[in-house]
Image (cartoon, coloured by chain):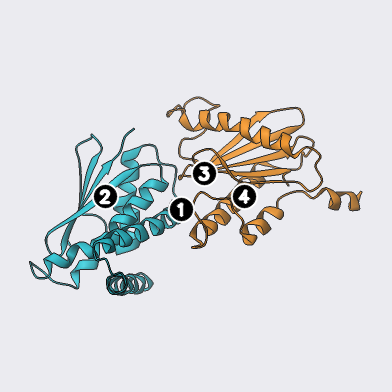
Amino acid sequence: MTDNASGVLFDLLHSQLVAYIYSTIDNKNKCVSQLESLGFRIGVSLGEQLTKDLPRFRDELEVMKFICRDFWSSLYQKQVDNLRTNHQGVYVLQDNAFKLLTHISVGKQYLDCAPRYLALSCGLIRGVLSNLGVKSVVTSEVISMPSAKFQIMVQRT
Amino acid sequence: MAVCIAVIAKENYPLYIRCSANVEDELKFHFTVHTSLDVVEEKISSTGKTSTAGAPDMREFYLGQLYPSEDYRIYGYVTNTKVKFVMVVEASNTQIRDNDVRSMFRRLHNAYTSVVCNPFYILGSNISSKAFEKVVAGMIVDEQKKELFT
């Protein structure tokens, strides 16, 4: 019951946050990057909290599995449906029913508004990864609501 | 009860160092903590040699005693986010047990997590939170208090 409540709270707060950012910032091009940097800071703190009780990660793949399972289920009450990688540092996370999009539409309606609802989540992923020592660039893609794809490109020095 | 406690960021610069109240040579502790970082790095990079008796379990945060010295024992702890905690304890302090050190590190970790979740804390800057300082003060041995009892 409490899990459901916190999920609903986050969903509603998030949609209001997106609306607020879009109404207060004049330069609309900056909105997405503002949302992304918000997500980054949240992701760092969340990462610190969630990894506190888990055993130490051995390698990058374990970090990715943590993101797909524990991180995703604590935020969206479900796990990532599909994780693909090319073993060269590119990971694609596919969520067939992304929680923050399910209340918007099913299919193609409002598709052009979808990126603004995914910006915070991209930042969240980037924040957690950066706290765990993985520098990355996270982008998202929506082909058909509510399924979303997140692409993580790890920057190897 | 420790003599010195330090929190070191993942880029290996100190976020917080606190030594016991009237210790003459604080700089010496800073130096000791700095040199113990090498040992920490060595322990976390050793790849999966869990069969040998001396190597720590790869899944653990607690690293145990880093290296012995005549006056002090140094303990280390690393988190998943590569933040290291180093604790210096007097060698003459024989009452302190391994489990005590583990629980002290656990409390430090919880306090550090609270600091990071504080929205006013800028990531990577020095820790100035009073709540964190209270937790650390509870663990540092106070030389003045010890003399009251002798």
- Whole-Å distance between the Cαs marked 3 and 4? 17 Å
Provide the residue designation for mark 1.
Answer: A48
Q: Is residue A10 left or right of residue B142?
A: left
Q: Is residue A1 left or right of residue A108?
A: right
Q: Is residue B136 left or right of residue B62?
A: right
Q: Residues within 10 Å of mark 2 (few under 14, many from 20)?
A: many
Tell me the element at label 3: loop
- Give me the residue at 44% from left, 57% from top: A45
* Residues marked 1 and 2, same chain: yes
Provide the residue designation for mark 3.
Answer: B83
- Whole-Å distance between the Cαs marked 1 and 4? 18 Å
Q: Which chain is orange?
A: B
Q: Chain of mark 2?
A: A
Residue B97 visible in the displayed image: yes
Provide the residue designation for mark 2.
Answer: A138
Provide the residue designation for mark 4.
Answer: B103
Q: Chain of mark 1?
A: A
Q: Nearer the viewer, mark 2 or mark 3?
A: 2
> Is the C-beta separation of discs 4 and 2 under 8 Å?
no
Q: Nearer the viewer, mark 1 or mark 4?
A: 1
- Whole-Å distance between the Cαs marked 2 and 3? 24 Å
Q: Colour of chain A?
A: cyan
| Figure quadrant of residue A25 | bottom left
- Give me the residue at 55% from left, 40% from top: B13
Q: Residues within 10 Å of mark 3 (few under 14, many from 20)?
A: many
What amino acid type is highlighted by mark number 3? Val
What amino acid type is highlighted by mark number 1? Glu
Q: Nearer the viewer, residue A134 or A84?
A: A134
Q: Is residue B127 left or right of residue A67?
A: right
Whether residue A66 is situated above or below residue A22 in the rendered picture: above
* Residues marked 3 and 4, same chain: yes
